[in-house]
Image (spheres, rainbow, N blue to C red):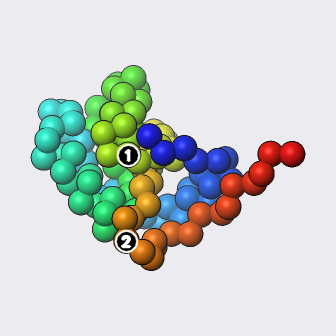
Amino acid sequence: MLELTPDQCRHLRSLAHHLNPVVMIGNNGLTDAVMREIAVNLDAHELIKIRVLGDDREARAQFMQQICADLGAAPVQMLGKLLLIYRPSNTEKPKIMLPKKKKAA
């Protein structure tokens, strides 16, 4: 799983403000088809919002962990029923430039 600094998370949250959810996780949970759709959208956009149906907060947290672990992505934010997930693209030119990690003093 990818690790982000607080500054990087803040930057990604600001970029995601205007985004609409591109994938919905329904009552069937994280099926293979849903995981493929998430992977395709991460490749295309790097930063995506996922809407989770249902009221189970624990289930949403587990979905976030599983998606990030399986796809090598970073959890940015879980806000209500929306998950915000980031994964840099494998191409030479990433779409999103993250702030540099600061060196520890």
Dot label at residue 91 = 2
47 vs 103, left or right, is left
Please tell me which residue lies in front, 30 or 71: 71
Quarter of the image where one finds residue 27 = top left
6 vs 66, left or right, is right
Quarter of the image where one finds residue 48 = bottom left
Q: Position of residue 58 (x, y in %)?
A: 39, 23
Q: Where does label 1 land, which residue?
A: 72
Name which of mark 2 and mark 1 comes first in the sequence.
1
26 vs 64, left or right, is left
Give SS at disc 2.
loop
Q: Residue furthest bottom?
A: 93
Is 13 located above or below residue 61 in the figure? below
Q: Residue at x 39, y 33 (%)?
A: 65
Is 71 located above or below residue 13 in the figure? above
Quarter of the image where one finds residue 22 = bottom left
Q: In the picture, which quadrant includes the C terminus? A: top right
Mark yes or no: residue 23 visible. no
